[in-house]
Image (spheres, rainbow, N blue to C red):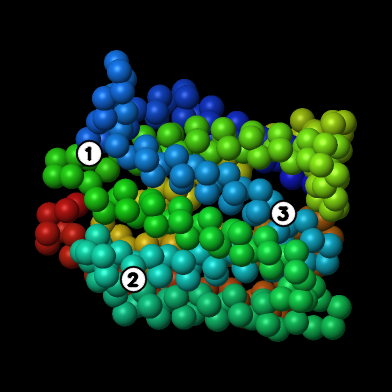
Amino acid sequence: QIDYMVFNTIGGTLTALGIVIARRWYRLRSNRYIKLGSLAIPQEMYYIVPSGFMTAIIIPTTTLMYTFQGMSVMVAMVIMRASVIIISRVVDSVQIAQGILKKKVYIEENIAVVFALLAASVKVFWVKEGDFAFIENTAAVSILVSYIIAYSIRIYIMNYYKNTRAQGVPLDNQGFFGLEQFAACFFIVVISVVVYYGKPLFGWEGVQVTQFHDALGSFSENWGWAVLSGTAFGIVAFYSVFIFMFKGRTATFAGLVNRLTSLTAGTFATLLSAILLATHYPNLQDWLSLAFILIAVGFLTVAEKKRAAELIAKKEI
């Protein structure tokens, strides 16, 4: 599992970074530039670099959540997606209180949050005998807490950037994404080196640490296929960030759209795997969770029609 995840992550990271370099998405149109000798540094770098560090934490913790024996991909996905939905709603509340976000969260968006959480609750708390008991596993809970803290900071930063553009300064999502990717890649390399040498130098133990060290120390024969599979992960990264920074929308709306599409994809991926690879079909919990997701999408549709009309009336779009 770790063998695959390590090289899948490498493929995804290189895909995102390669597109950023090819498209030259490393020139940010800034609110204000800070002179550093002959260089003009965008003021936003003060928080884009920390956002990249949070991304460097999110990527491996996401990966690790899929490596627990007995926990299905669907369960891991639902738990993480639901966490981000909650974070997005909290970020909106904080930034409204700070006066950074000038828009209100529609009642339909709040109702969609409730149904999204119901979808997650079905997977987390409806545990049958023999299922993975997530809340009783210390390692799984610790990884999730790290994921939640990192994503909370990152979503706050992305929305702070979006909601504080100066008059006449465009919302340069490509520039933000590009600089964040450079920072994330730097920190991923640093973290990987520390973990890799942590075992022989400091005697770090743990199944994941050992498998990570062995995966990089001796490439498996199928490492190239694993890297190739990561290209999908890299491509999704663009949509993941851009939807969070969708102009004129709240973090609640963007977080819901981002995560509900992932949850729906997870259900259909489970179904396709059952048909093509003879694995288990989605169970009753999966279908009930999907039903709640579709109800949430219905409320989001109503909210988006209202938001689009509001933005048109204010000539923001």
The amino acid at mark 1 is Asn
Q: CA distance from mark 3 to mark 1?
A: 37 Å
The quarter of the displayed image where residue 89 is located:
bottom left
| Residue 281 % position (x, y) | 76, 69
Residue that carries the numbered disc 3 in the rendered image: 64
What secondary structure is found at the residue carrying circle 2? helix
The amino acid at mark 3 is Leu
What secondary structure is found at the residue carrying circle 1? loop
| Residue 59 % position (x, y) | 61, 48
| Residue 116 % position (x, y) | 51, 75
The amino acid at mark 2 is Ser
| Residue 147 % position (x, y) | 59, 58
Residue for point 32% across, 28% down: 41
Residue that carries the numbered disc 2 in the rendered image: 93
Note whether residue 281 is visible.
no
- Crowd rating for badge 3 (residues with CA inside 10 Å; few <14, some 14–19, many 20+): many
Q: CA distance from mark 1 to mark 2?
A: 24 Å
Instruction: Decide if residue 300 is on the left or right side of residue 238.
Output: left
Residue for point 82% across, 55% down: 277
Residue that carries the numbered disc 1 in the rendered image: 31
